[in-house]
Each structure stands twice: as C-alpha cells, then as structure tokens.
Image (cartoon, rainbow, N blue to C red):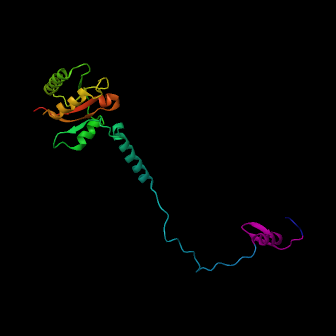
Amino acid sequence: MNNPRNKKQQQTSGKRVTDDDSSLFRDAVGEVKPVATGNKRQPDKTPPKVTTRMQHKDDKAVMRELMEDFQDVDLLETGEHLAWTAPGIQRSELKKLKSGKYAIQSEIDLHGFTREQAKSAVVEFLHEAQIRQLRCVRIIHGRGRKNPEKAPVLKRAVDNWLSHHKQVLAYCSARESDGGTGAVYVLLRRSD
C-alpha cells in the first residue's frame, strides 16, 4: 500500500499505518464500544470436576488386586468347590491358600484307590508331612466323573477326613492349573 497519495501516516510499533489501512481495519471490525472497567464477568460458582491422575492410578491398582484374587470358582458356586477352615483360623489364610500363595511342598494322587486304600494313604501322607514339618500339601482326589453313580466318592470322603483331622488348619479346591475341583490344597499346623 505504498500509495503516494496517502500523505497522512501513523507510527505504530515501528510500522507505518496509513489512512487506508486504518479504514480497512475499521470496516472489518465494525462498530466498537469501550468496555466499562466495573463490568467484569463473574466466574462460575461451581468449579469444574477435577480427576487427579493418582486417583485414576489408585482405582486401576485396586481393580488389578481384585482380579489377582479372582478365581473361576468365584464366578458361580456349583457345589463342586471345597473350602474349610478350622475354628479360629482367619479368612485371610484361606484366601492366600486359594490364590496359591503357599508353595506346595508335597502331593499325593488318589486316582485308582478304593475308599479304604485312599483313607489309609491320606492318613499316612499327613503323618509323614507332619514329621517333615511341611506347611502346604496337595491331595489329588479326582472329580469322580467315571463313577457310574455320578457322585464323586473320594472327593466327598477327602472333604470329610480333612475337616476332622487335627493337623489340618484349612483346605480348598485347587486352582485350575493344579487340578481344579479334582484336587485340594491343604494347610497344615506347624509341628511343635
């Protein structure tokens, strides 16, 4: 806009503004009213909801912990899952046993045993575990699905024997990777 006819120019921020420039600006902006200094906009009375990053991380951590303790057998109690604790034993011990927090130190497999053979084997196995001062063992009793009566004979018997054995503090069905409802983890008393 170097028009020699524009004789009037203004100096603004080191740049020259001509009358034509000012006229174009006013045409583009339109009518302007001055803002009164006492007419400030009032802030909203309700502040926006704040979600902190730590709260989100904490929520995720809680969900992760819940899922770690979650077992397939917790989905639906079918009657196939075994669980028992001796009087005075905290529920947290059973929870640790269920989640596999105790190392399995020995095991016995009762497949092919008669009821009488299995009872003798379990009694001897638990006695030997006490002598060796074992804390956690696994007993594989099977699911009893080959039984023509469709009722698991050894599973029911093991449930009964363990709940009456003085060395047993708690027991529960194993995780799927350790035999599921065809085996139990057994938590034993410490020997004196």
- Residues shaded magenta: 5-29
Residue 79 or 84: which is nearer the viewer? 79
Residue 26 in percent (x, y) is at 77, 72
Residue 119 or 95: which is nearer the viewer? 119
Residue 46 in percent (x, y) is at 48, 69
* In the image, residue 185 lies in the stretch drawn in magenta: no
Residue 163 in percent (x, y) is at 17, 35
Compared with 4, 85 (above or below) is above
Q: Quadrant of residue 147?
A: top left
- In percent of the image, x 43 and y 51: which residue is there? 56
Residue 10 or 112: which is nearer the viewer? 112
- In percent of the image, x 20 and y 29: which residue is there? 157
11 relative to 98 in the view: left or right: right
Residue 129 or 184: which is nearer the viewer? 184
- Quarter holding the N terminus? bottom right
- Quarter holding the C terminus? top left
Query: For the image shown, how many numbered marks are present on the structure?
Result: 0
